[in-house]
Image (cartoon, rainbow, N blue to C red):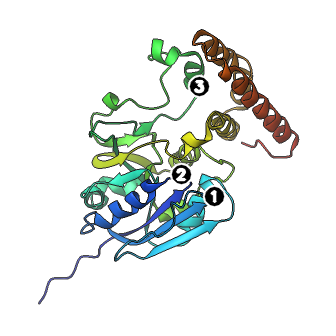
Amino acid sequence: MAPAQRSLPAVDVVIVNWNAGHHLADCVRSVVRADRSELGVARIVVVDNASTDGSAARLTAADIPLDLVRNDRNRGFAFACNQGAARGDSDLVLFLNPDTELYPDSLTVVGRVLRTPPADRVGIFGGLMVDDEGNPQISCSRFPSLRVYLGKMTGLDRLAPALFPPHHLRPRELVASGPVDQVIGAFFLVRRQVFTELHGFDERYFLYLEDVDFAWRARRAGWLSYYVEQVRVHHTGQVSSSQLGVWRHYLLLRSRTTYAFRHWARPRAWALVALTLSVEPAARLAAAVVRGRWADLGATLAVYRSFLRWFHRGSREENAFTM
C-alpha cells in the first residue's frame, strides 16, 4: 500500500504597493523562485494603492495565480492589507513589503517550523531582515510604552537604554529564535484563524503601527508572535515611505496617538499627547538649529500644526479615541 501523501500547508501572499519601482517585481519574482516544497503558495495578491510609477504594470508570477487589485486612491496600508487578505482563503496569510525579497529557503524553513508542537500557540511568525550584504537589520520590536517614546523623543534611548529601552530590538539582542512582542510587518506571516478572529488590521492606522496593534491584540487573545532566526528576508526598507518626506513623521504621530488611546490607560495616553506637543517638537527644532538645517524648522512646525489639527478634530468626534 502506498504511503499517505502529506498535506502541504498553503499561504496567500499579500503585497501592498505604493510606488515601489522595480522592487515590487523583484519581490514577486523571489516568491516564485522560493522553494515551496514545505509551504505552498496558493496565490499572490498585489494591492496597488494608486501608484503613479508604473510599478504594478506587467507583473508575472509564473505558475502561481496572481491577483492585482488597483485602488483609485491611496487607501492606507492597513486597509489595503485587509483587501488583499480577503481575496484568498488559505490557512495562512503572508504580508510582504514590496521592498523585500525572499531567500530560496525562506518558505521551507517556515513550513518546517509550522509542524513543530510549539508552533500551535503561535499566531504570527517573522524572520531575520538582512541588508544587501546579509547583515542583520531590525526584525522585531517591543510593545511601545510611554517610557519608550520619551526615550526616542529625547535621545535617552541611546544614552540610557537600560532606563529608556528603544522601540526596536537591536540585532544583537536577538540571539535565537523565540517568542517576541512583535515581528515587523515587512514579513508578517499570520494564521488566517487569528486574522479572522481579530477582524484584520485596524484601518484607523493609515501607515505605521498597524502591525504592532495587531500583535498586541493577538497576544491578549492568547496568540504569540515568534521570531524565526533561520528565515532570512532581504529588506531594502523605506522605499515607499521615504517619498513622503517629513510627512512620514506626521503619520507616525497619528498612529502612535491612536495606539496609545486604544491600548494604554487614559492618563498615559494624554501624557504622550502632551509630550508630543512640547518636548518632542522642541527637541527637533533644537536639533535642526544645531545642524544648521534651517529648512527643517518650517517643515517641523508644519508637521506638528497638522497633527494638532488632526487631534483636535478627532477629540471632538464621538469615540474617535476609544480604548
Residue 65 x, y percent position in the rendering:
42, 76
Q: Report the residue that reaches farthest toward the top.
A: 290
Of marks 1 and 3, the one in the foreground: 1
- Where, quadrant-wise, is the C terminus in this rendering? top right
At label 1, counting other C-alpha atoms closer than 10 Å, the crowd grade (few under 14, some 14-19, many 20 or more) is many
- Where, quadrant-wise, is the N terminus in this rendering? bottom left
Of marks 3 and 2, the one in the foreground: 3
Q: Which residue is mark 3?
A: 149
When the figure is inspected, residue 311 is found, relative to residue 88, above or below; the finding is above
* C-alpha separation, residue under disc 3 versus residue under disc 2: 25 Å
Q: Which residue is mark 1?
A: 79
Residue type at numbered disc 2: Ala
Q: In which image quadrant can residue 199 be found?
A: bottom right
Q: In which image quadrant can residue 119 be found?
A: bottom left
Residue type at numbered disc 1: Phe
Q: Is residue 211 left or right of residue 125?
A: right
Of residues 306 and 87, the one nearer the viewer is: 306
Residue in view at x 45 percent, y 42 percent: 237
Q: Secondary structure at mark 3?
A: helix
Q: Report the residue that reaches farthest toward the bottom.
A: 1
Q: In which image quadrant can residue 12 be found?
A: bottom left
Q: Is residue 229 left or right of residue 283?
A: left
Q: Which residue is mark 2?
A: 221
Residue type at numbered disc 3: Tyr
When the figure is inspected, residue 61 is found, relative to residue 158, above or below; the finding is below
When the figure is inspected, residue 63 is found, relative to residue 122, above or below; the finding is below
Residue 113 x, y percent position in the rendering:
28, 56
Q: Can residue 169 be seen in the rendering of this structure?
A: yes
Q: Which one is earlier in the sequence, the residue at label 1 or at label 3?
A: 1
